[in-house]
Image (tube, grey):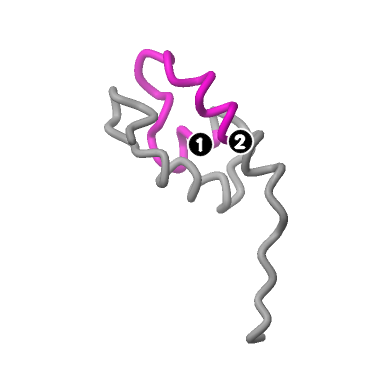
Amino acid sequence: MFVCICARVRECEVRAAIRGGARTEACVGEACGAGTGCGSCHDRIAELIDAEAARPLAVNLAA
């Protein structure tokens, strides 16, 4: 599913950017391009940032 139509950025790409350290709409835009066009997706990007922040951290048991 697309989060940002202007830049054709999918939700999985936005989530990957957030997991990679992007914590603001601007940082997500720098990482994957979402939110750098018309800006109508900023609310959805903020929701995804909040959702990812609420997720428990993954633990690598193989390490």
Task: State the residue at coordinates (57%, 51%).
Answer: 19
**Labels 2 and 1: the sequence-earlier one:** 1
Height in image: 40 above or below 35? above
Split into 4 quadrants, where in the image is the C terminus? bottom right
Horizontally, residue 60 falls left or right of residue 39, namely: right
Rendered location of residue 44, percent (x, y)? 50, 24
Residue range highlighted in magenta: 27-49
Disc on res. 28: 1
Disc count in the image? 2
Q: Residue 62 versus residue 20: which sits nearer the camera?
A: 62
Split into 4 quadrants, where in the image is the N terminus? top left
Rendered location of residue 33, percent (x, y)? 38, 34
Height in image: 17 above or below 35? below
Rendered location of residue 26, percent (x, y)? 54, 29
Residue 50 sits in which quadrant?
top right
Rendered location of residue 18, percent (x, y)? 56, 45
Asked whether residue 37 is drawn in magenta, I would say: yes
Disc on res. 49: 2
Task: State the residue at coordinates (71%, 43%).
Answer: 54
Task: State the residue at coordinates (50%, 20%).
Answer: 42
> Residue type at mark 2?
Ile
Task: State the residue at coordinates (68%, 49%).
Answer: 55
Disc on res. 1: none
Q: Secondary structure at mark 1?
A: helix
Labels 2 and 1 touching (C-beta < 8 A): yes
Q: Residues within 10 Å of mark 1 (few under 14, many from 20)?
A: many
> Residue type at mark 1?
Val
Horizontally, residue 45 falls left or right of residue 61, namely: left
